[in-house]
């Protein structure tokens, strides 16, 4: 599913018309991350084996080798190809990517005089920064909420946090669309939906066929939106 989400974004950037909504892949990616990370942490907490050191060590081993190679190759390419005026912004994005704040950097640069996306080769790291910021906060919250010994506490918190994030994103969208796109507080909804799937899978009992219903509903929604566009062509 992660591959499908990423490929939809890639195809969108390559200009494939059928993937005009490719940025939805980012939302799907965040939902998947919310599910996987929450499931792993909750499982470890229940087994009594969760530690912050092990959690962050696994994240570093998984993410940083590929990130550093990408940053190194990108900066080397930019050093030989970009004019001097673009090297400083590139260096800033390198530092921001390493520190997991590139989403904040690109948000701060958004505006009328902002450079084209083609001149920001590390622009795609904004989503990784959002994900890493989620890693900084969510594990501690899960550990804290799990100590209350109430099964419904964490999913209830996810519902409330997701609803507030969605409402805030809609409000913020009016005055600052870039902020609603780049900043982590407005992406909590996607992570919350993924986290809730952990408990939905546990509580669904004998209602496994709901999975098929949701798949059909999702494909049907896509088909309904695709047919009018096809007729226009």
Image (cartoon, rainbow, N blue to C red):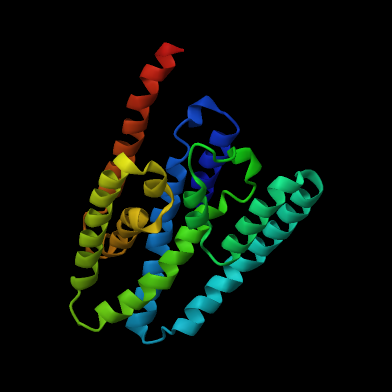
- Across and down, in percent, residue 33 comes to 43, 60
Name the residue furthest right. 80
Q: Say left or right for 129 vs 118.
A: left
Q: Residue at x 31, y 75 (%)?
A: 141
**Viewer-side residue, 54 vs 181:** 181
Q: Say left or right for 189 vs 82.
A: left
Q: Is residue 7 above or below residue 74?
A: above
- Across and down, in percent, residue 176 comes to 36, 44
Any part of residue 204 in sight: no
**Viewer-side residue, 58 vs 68:** 68
Q: Residue at x 79, y 44 (%)?
A: 81
Q: Is residue 228 above or below residue 142?
A: above
Q: Residue at x 38, y 75 (%)?
A: 139
**Viewer-side residue, 164 vs 233:** 164
Any part of residue 171 in sight: yes
Q: Quadrant of residue 13?
A: top right
**Viewer-side residue, 69 vs 181:** 181
Count of numbered circles on the image: 0
Q: Residue at x 25, y 84 (%)?
A: 147
Q: Is residue 3 above or below residue 159?
A: above
Name the residue furthest top. 232
Name the residue furthest bottom. 48
- Across and down, in percent, residue 105 comes to 52, 55
Q: Say left or right for 133 vs 93.
A: left
- Across and down, in percent, residue 151 comes to 20, 74
Q: Say left or right for 42 vs 99.
A: left
């Amino acid at each position: 599913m992660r591959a499908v989400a990423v490929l939809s974004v890639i195809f969108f950037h390559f200009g494939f018309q059928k993937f005009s909504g490719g940025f939805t892949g980012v939302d799907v990616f965040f939902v998947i991350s919310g599910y996987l990370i929450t499931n792993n942490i909750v499982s470890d907490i229940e087994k009594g084996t969760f530690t912050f050191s092990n959690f962050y060590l696994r994240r570093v081993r998984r993410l940083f080798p590929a990130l550093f190679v990408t940053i190194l190759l990108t900066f080397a390419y930019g050093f030989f190809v970009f004019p001097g005026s673009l090297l400083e912004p590139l260096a800033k994005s390198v530092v921001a990517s390493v520190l997991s704040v590139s989403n904040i950097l690109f948000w701060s640069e958004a505006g009328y005089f902002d450079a084209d996306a083609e001149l920001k080769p590390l622009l795609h790291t904004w989503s990784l920064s959002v994900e890493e910021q989620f890693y900084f906060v969510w594990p501690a919250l899960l550990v804290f909420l799990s100590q209350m010994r109430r099964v419904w506490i964490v999913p209830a918190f996810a519902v409330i946090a997701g609803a507030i994030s969605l409402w805030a994103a809609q409000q913020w969208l009016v005055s600052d669309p870039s902020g609603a796109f780049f900043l982590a507080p407005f992406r909590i909804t996607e992570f919350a939906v993924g986290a809730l799937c952990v408990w939905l899978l546990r509580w669904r009992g004998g209602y496994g066929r709901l999975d098929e219903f949701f798949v059909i509903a999702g494909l049907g929604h896509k088909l309904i939106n695709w047919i009018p566009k096809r007729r226009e062509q």
